[in-house]
Every structure is written in C-alpha cells, then in structure tokens.
C-alpha cells in the first residue's frame, strides 16, 4: 500500500509545482483560439481562393495551422503572427485581437476593413513589432495606444480615412524604423518629437492636411533614407541639415507652402 500512497504524493507535488504554469498555458491557448474565432466572426470575406476556409473554429482543429496564422515555438498555442493581406476582407477589427498578447506581426494590408482602431486594444499588444494596416478604410484617429507598444519597428496606416493629429508620443518608440502615415486626412503639425526616432529609416506623411514648419530634428536623423511629405500645407523653410544626411536617398516636399533657397551644393552627394 505504501507505493500507491507514494505515487499519489508525487502526483500531488507535481500538480502543486507545475499546474499554475501548465494551466496558464492552456488558458492562453484557449484564449488565442477564441480570439481568432471571434476575430473571424467580425469579418466578411470575398475570398474566392478560400484562404480562410480553414478557420472553422472546430475544437479538434489545430488553429496554428489556419491560413495566415503562425504560433510560437517556445510558447505552443500562442499566436505570434497574423498575415491576412489582400484577401478581400471587410468588416472591422474585433476588440478580441487584444487577447493575442504574444502577437508581434499584424498584417491586414490591402483589404476593405473599416471602423476605428481601438487604442485600448492596441495598447495591450506589448510584443507587437510589425503593424501593417495600409490600403483599407479605417477611420477615426491614429490610436495613441500604439505608444505603449515599445517594440514597434514598423507602422503603416497609409491610404485610409484617418483624421486628427499625429500623436506626439510616437516619438517615444525608439526602435521604430518605418513610419508610413500618408494618404489620410491628418491635421495639425508634424510633432517635433519624431526627431527622437534615432533608428528611423523611412517616414511618409504625404497627402494629408498637415501645416506648420518642418521639425529641425527630422534633419538630424542620421540613418534616414526616405522622407515623403508632399501635398500638405507645410510652411517655412527646408532645414538645410537634410542635405548633410549621407544615407538620404529620397526627399519629397513638393506641393507645400515652403519658401527659401536650397543650398548651392544640394544634391552633390
């Protein structure tokens, strides 16, 4: 009788030691599955190729094999990537997307999604590195919740129907390398805080209704390769330090209200 009692004691010790982490993993997996099912329910799909046909919500199916879904190897059952570009998706982004707390890539490029981007939902995605929402019909403001996603390297919300100001707190995303805000209805100024983005390679805020002067700090970004600010109402002069950036390959400020003269050696480098 001693052996069964010993086995029971060992099992009890195992449960006491490992169950909290094990149950947390199961809860996370269940949460991620349910989040995907509800995310899918908020969409309408005109996808003739059937790219989301695998998203059947069945408890017996491996949701990590659903189309466009990638899960973590280190944390089984936790979704790390959603790549759903150019699938003819319509509808809105369900708030349950905020439950995918291991998500580092969200790519919804070139669909017909609409509605506002919930800043509280976005702020929960602390691991997010790549956000691609361009060429949809999103409205409302650029979510300030992005500023809580300190790991972001890439943000693109081009070609939507966003309005309001560019959040100045975007200047706190010190790992950011790409920021595309063009072809919206943004107003206000270009925040001087964007000059803090010392890793920035590309920035675009063309075809908006931005005004005011060009922040001097943008011309001090030593890795900058591309800046496109055409078709706004920017005024003042072009900071001459732009022409000292050896990495700069494209400089676009046409169709604004700028004045002054270019340096005589502009373009020589």
Image (cartoon, grey):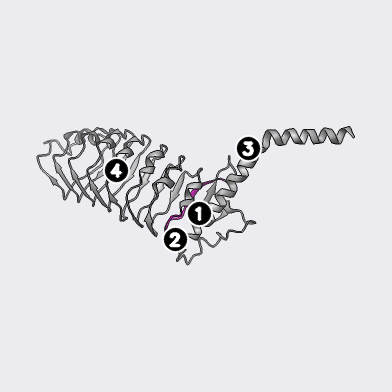
Asked which secondary structure carries label 2, the reply is: loop
What is the quadrant of the C terminus in the image?
A: top left
Depicted 39 relative to depicted 177: above or below? below
Spatial CA distance of label 4 from label 3 is 42 Å
Q: Which tag, 4 or 3, sits closer to the chain's start?
A: 3
Asked which secondary structure carries label 4, the reply is: strand
What residue appears at the point 45 percent right and 46 percent down from the top-left corner? 105
Looking at the picture, how far across and down is residue 161, in whole percent? 30, 56
What is the quadrant of the N terminus in the image?
A: top right
Task: Tell me the quarter of the picture where residue 168 sits.
Answer: top left
Spatial CA distance of label 1 from label 2 is 10 Å
User: In the image, which is nearer the foreground, mark 4 or mark 3?
Assistant: 3
Is mark 1 in CB contact (under 8 Å) with mark 2? Answer: yes
In magenta, the rendered stretch is 78-94
Depicted 62 relative to depicted 201: above or below? below
Disc number for residue 203? 4
Question: What residue would you read off at disc 1?
Answer: 68
Asked which secondary structure carries label 1, the reply is: loop
Q: Which tag, 4 or 1, sits closer to the chain's start?
A: 1
What residue appears at the point 33 percent right and 48 percent down from the top-left corner? 142
Question: What residue would you read off at disc 3?
Answer: 21
Asked which secondary structure carries label 3, the reply is: helix
Question: What residue would you read off at disc 2?
Answer: 87
Q: Which tag, 4 or 2, sits closer to the chain's start?
A: 2
């Amino acid at each position: 009788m001693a052996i069964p009692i010993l086995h029971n004691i060992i099992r009890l010790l195992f449960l006491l030691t490992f169950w909290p982490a094990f149950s947390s993993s199961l809860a996370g997996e269940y949460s991620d599955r349910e989040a995907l099912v509800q995310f899918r329910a908020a969409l309408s799909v005109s996808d003739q190729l059937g790219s989301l046909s695998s998203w059947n919500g069945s408890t017996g199916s491996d949701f990590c094999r659903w189309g466009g879904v990638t899960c973590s190897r280190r944390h089984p059952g936790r979704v790390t990537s959603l790549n759903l570009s150019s699938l003819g998706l319509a509808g809105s982004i369900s708030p349950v997307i905020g439950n995918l707390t291991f998500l580092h890539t969200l790519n919804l490029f070139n669909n017909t999604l609409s509605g506002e981007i919930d800043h509280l939902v976005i702020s929960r995605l602390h691991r997010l590195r790549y956000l691609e929402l361009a060429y949809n019909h999103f409205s409302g403001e650029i979510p300030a919740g992005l500023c809580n996603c300190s790991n972001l390297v890439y943000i693109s919300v081009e070609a939507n129907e966003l309005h309001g100001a560019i959040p100045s707190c975007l200047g706190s995303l010190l790992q950011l390398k790409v920021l595309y805000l063009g072809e919206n209805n943004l107003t206000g100024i270009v925040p001087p805080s964007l000059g803090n983005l010392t890793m920035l390679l590309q920035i675009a805020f063309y075809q908006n209704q931005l005004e005011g002067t060009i922040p001097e700090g943008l011309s001090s970004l030593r890795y900058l390769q591309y800046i496109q600010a055409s078709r706004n109402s920017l005024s003042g002069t072009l900071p001459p330090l732009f022409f000292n950036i050896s990495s700069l390959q494209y400089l676009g400020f046409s169709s604004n209200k700028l004045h002054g003269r270019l340096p005589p050696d502009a373009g020589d480098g």
